[in-house]
Each structure stands twice: as structure tokens, then as C-alpha cells.
Amino acid sequence: MGNSNREIRSSRLLDAPRELVWKAFTDPEHIKQWWGPNGFTNTIHKMDVRRGGEWNFIMHGPDGTNYRNEIHYVEVTAPERLVLSHGPTPRFQMTIELFDRGSKTEVHWCNLFETEEDYKRAVEVFHAIEGQKQTIDRLESYLSSNFQPH
């Protein structure tokens, strides 16, 4: 893979059809319900899901710390692939791929950091490996609740 010293990867088989998982990732009313590690909440200011569009939001940590996020959509291929650019710090590219597995969806999620330093800081300071796992756990839990698309 060549970038293993700069990337965090997760995959999961979710018990929900791909269109529903896509909606959970691309509808601000849904993503704010589950995005981020355990205990985090979100305030979404802008979510323009299209190539070149912006997603600006604040993640509110359980300790009251606010984390401003600025993301740009690099690629949007509904309902199978999102590529997002996160910055200004840390800088990383997030790729989310959704594979149709009948009534289920296989999610592949990769965060590729611009530098090894950004990766190390994300892992050591922000516990990003566990954070990504908890975020997917929260998505899985949200999808198994009474989630209904609009």
C-alpha cells in the first residue's frame, strides 16, 4: 500500500442498503446524528455535496471543546464513492466507498494524511484510529435505529 505510515483504514459490513448508507453520509439532517467519536455532537453550517462543494461544521467534544472542520468534496459518485479533502489542520484526504451487498452495504473508509507528522498527531493527540472506529460504530447504530430517509 505504500502509504500505511500515513493512513487510517476501516471497513465494515452494515445491515442497510447502499442508498440508505449514502443518504446517511450526504444528508446534513442524518450525518449530524452520528458523525464523530462517542460523545460528540455536530453543528453543520454548510453541506454542499457535489464536486467542489464545501462541508463546514463544528464538532462539539464531550468536554466542551469545539473542533472546526472545513472539508471540500473532491469526488462525488452517488451512491458509491466520496472523496473529501480536510483542512487546514490536519490535512488529509478521506475516501469513503460503499459496495452494494444486496440488503447490506460494505463500507471502506480511508483517511490519508498529507504528512507522517499530521498522521502521528492525529493518532497520538486525537486518537484518530479509535475515533474512526467509534464513528463507524455510531453510523451502524444509527442505521439500525428507526432511520428513515426523507
Image (tube, rainbow, N blue to C red):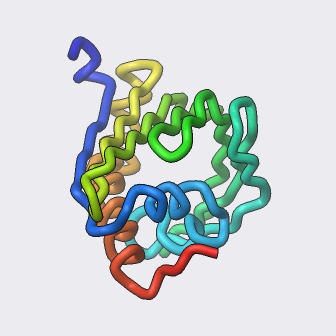
| Residue at 35% in and 47% down | 128
| Residue at 72% in and 50% down | 56
Left or right for 11, reference 76: left
Left or right for 42, reference 96: right
User: Depth check: 148 or 113 in front?
Assistant: 148
User: Depth check: 150 or 5 in front?
Assistant: 150
| Residue at 44% in and 75% down | 39
Decide: is 45 above or below 60.
above
Where the C terminus falls, by quadrant? bottom right
Q: Please count the marks in the image.
A: 0
Where the N terminus falls, by quadrant? top left
| Residue at 28% in and 17% down | 3
Locate residue 66, reporting x and y percent.
63, 62
- Can you tell which quarter of the image residue 111 is in? top left
> In the displayed image of the protein, which residue is found farthest to the front?
102
Locate residue 84, reporting x and y percent.
56, 35
Locate residue 93, reporting x and y percent.
49, 29
> In the displayed image of the protein, which residue is found farthest to the bottom?
146
On the question of residue 89 being in view, the answer is no
Decide: is 88 above or below 104.
above
On the question of residue 38 being in view, the answer is yes
Locate residue 83, reporting x and y percent.
52, 33
- Can you tell which quarter of the image residue 46 is in? bottom right
User: Depth check: 32 or 39 in front?
Assistant: 32
